[in-house]
Image (tube, helix red, strand yellow):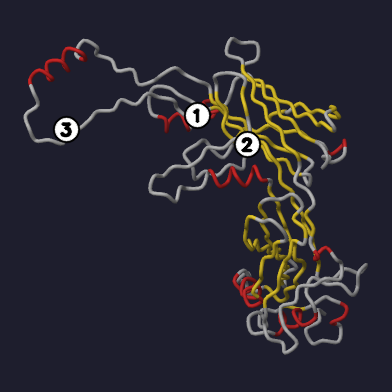
């Protein structure tokens, strides 16, 4: 983010002659200085984005710098070093009841997953990370403190700090082994089915999505695995939250994602993954403050929960979310009566209007006497 001084000129709205005196005064004041200073006093600006998730064993923090310089800013954006601090160290400290329990020094690494659609360098990006897998997961009762020291030892050294607790307490009735998705009523008419976050814990915003997984088998013994990502919606919450699935849309999505290959002679549905993500109130505020303005004035509040000990500035956030993932398979030998789809829904997948001609068969042992059982 570039700091600069704006020079404003007032346009004359009158068509009267401009008095000669004011022309002379204007020339006297400004003609002796040939250079106009566009850049004011420079301040370093740190850009920080970190979201801890107790479901993760590796946690990533983005730390960048705003850049300034003569020339075309779009050209600077294509140079990776323009967006990095040369000298930086960062730590995460875990505190419980005010006492330090654990601490981690962040290491840097390069990832090759950045979208190439933007104006900044891609696909490589530098991020900072720490691992907690060998030391056990993050403690949901603890406070996590981030400290970043930039330009350490130099005259321009400054610190960025922030802290967060963890989002926790998410729960869903679909965690029950015997719960199944039911897309048909007793008259075998397609119906809706709710995916419910029965407890939101201390979340302020909830997102629910699904992953549908099926395999396609070919006559040459090759197999295609098809995974369908289905975002069911996101909302601010104060109590439980549910997303409604249209049964017809479930089968339509499967039909839309089959592979067009004459070698395929069988398809088997494998699993449904339910992903419920809860975000902190700080994360919710940060997301809302970065949405496009919906007012004529285009004014938006700036929000960050980070601070710095100097005249330099920081933007971004250090906060948390919780991801609850529930994977339900169509058939597992250790749970022979359970299934992600109830019997009517399995039947419709293999024989119904939308997918009945797509070679789906059921490998569930309770369908062994059905004509759509996998041979």
Task: Say whether disc 3 or disc 1 marks the residue closer to the N-terminus.
Answer: 3
Q: Is residue 70 left or right of residue 22?
A: right
Task: Say whether disc 2 or disc 3 marks the residue closer to the N-terminus.
Answer: 3
Q: Which residue is mark 2?
A: 317
Q: Badge 2 local density, few (<14 within 10 Å), some, or many (20+)?
A: many
| Residue 72 drawn at (x, y percent) | 38, 29
Q: Which residue is mark 3?
A: 12
Q: Residue at x 68, y 40 (%)?
A: 51
Q: Tag on residue 345?
A: none
| Residue 149 drawn at (x, y percent) | 66, 20
Q: Which picture quadrant has residue 215? A: bottom right
> Callout 1: helix, strand or loop?
loop
Q: Quadrant of the C terminus?
A: bottom right
> Callout 2: helix, strand or loop?
strand
Q: Tag on residue 79?
A: 1
Contact (CB < 8 A) between labels 1 and 2? no
């Amino acid at each position: 983010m570039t700091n600069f001084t704006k020079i404003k000129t007032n346009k004359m709205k009158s068509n009267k002659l401009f008095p000669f005196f004011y022309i002379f005064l204007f020339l006297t004041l400004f003609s002796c200085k040939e250079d106009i200073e566009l850049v004011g006093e420079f301040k370093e600006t740190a850009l920080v984005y970190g979201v801890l998730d107790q479901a993760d064993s590796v946690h990533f923090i983005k730390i960048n710098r705003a850049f300034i310089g003569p020339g075309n800013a779009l050209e600077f954006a294509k140079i990776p070093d323009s967006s990095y601090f040369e000298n930086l160290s960062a730590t995460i400290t875990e505190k419980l009841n005010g006492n330090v329990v654990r601490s981690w020094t962040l290491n840097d690494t390069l990832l090759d997953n950045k979208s190439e659609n933007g104006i900044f360098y891609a696909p490589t990006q530098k991020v900072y990370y720490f691992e907690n897998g060998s030391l056990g997961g993050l403690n949901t009762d603890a406070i996590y403190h981030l400290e970043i020291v930039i330009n350490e030892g130099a005259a321009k050294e400054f610190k960025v700090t922030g802290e967060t607790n963890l989002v926790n307490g998410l729960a869903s009735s679909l965690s029950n082994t015997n719960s199944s998705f039911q897309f048909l009523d007793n008259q075998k008419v397609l119906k809706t089915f709710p995916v419910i976050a029965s407890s939101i814990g201390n979340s302020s915003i909830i997102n629910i999505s699904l992953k549908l997984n099926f395999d396609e088998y070919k006559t040459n013994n090759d197999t295609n695995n098809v995974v369908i990502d289905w975002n069911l919606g996101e909302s601010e919450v104060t109590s439980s939250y549910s997303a409604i699935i249209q049964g017809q849309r479930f089968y339509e999505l499967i039909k839309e994602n089959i592979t067009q290959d004459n070698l395929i002679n069988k398809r088997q549905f494998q699993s449904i993954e339910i992903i419920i993500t809860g975000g902190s109130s700080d994360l919710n505020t940060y997301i809302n403050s970065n949405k496009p303005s919906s007012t004529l004035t285009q004014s938006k509040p700036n929000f960050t929960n980070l601070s710095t000990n100097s005249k330099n500035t920081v933007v971004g956030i250090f906060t948390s979310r919780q991801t609850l993932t529930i994977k339900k398979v169509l058939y597992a030998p250790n749970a022979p009566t359970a299934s992600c789809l109830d019997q009517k829904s399995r039947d419709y997948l293999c024989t119904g209007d939308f997918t009945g001609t797509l070679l789906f068969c059921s490998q569930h042992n309770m369908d062994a006497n059905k004509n759509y059982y996998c041979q």
